Image (spheres, rainbow, N blue to C red):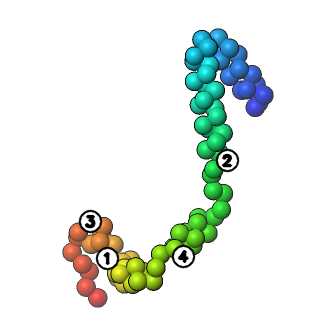
Amino acid sequence: MQTEVAQTIFEKVKTLPLQSQEEVLEFIEEKLSSAKKKDSRPIWEVLAEISSNVPDEEWAKLPSDGAENHDHYLYGAPKKQK
């Protein structure tokens, strides 16, 4: 199946003018480049790496009731009282 798709793409690209073929080639190279850059680590590892760069004093600024009052912090809804 993959070979059939590649062959179909090749046949269609051959019918394009040279300028368009160059644009297709550039598009394919961008796709290949972005595919190589993708991070395949689990999301929790990515988050752990990012959060390890945040200083402790910045973590201390976060509200302790963020889970309960997320609507307040995101949308300005009234805070829920405990």
Q: Earlier in the sequence, mark 2 or mark 1?
A: 2
Residue position for label 2:
36
Judge from the rendering whether residue 29 lies leftward or rightward of residue 76; answer left or right: right
Instruction: Provide residue 69's location: percent of width, then percent of height.
Output: 31, 76
Q: Is residue 7 above or below residue 41?
A: above
Labels 2, 1: front one: 2
Q: To which residue does mark 1 refer?
A: 69
Q: Is residue 8 above or below residue 1?
A: above
Asked whether the beta carbons under mark 1 and mark 4 sit within 8 Å of each other, the answer is no
Q: Which mark is residue 75?
A: 3
Q: Is residue 68 visible?
A: no
Q: Separation of disc 1 and disc 3 at Cα?
A: 10 Å
Figure quadrant of residue 2: top right
Nearest-to-viewer mark from 4 and 3: 4
Pointers 4 and 3 in contact (C-beta within 8 Å): no
Q: CA distance from mark 4 to mark 3?
A: 28 Å
Amino acid type, callout 1: Asn
Coordinates of residue 46 in the picture (x, y in percent): 58, 66
Image mark for residue 52: 4
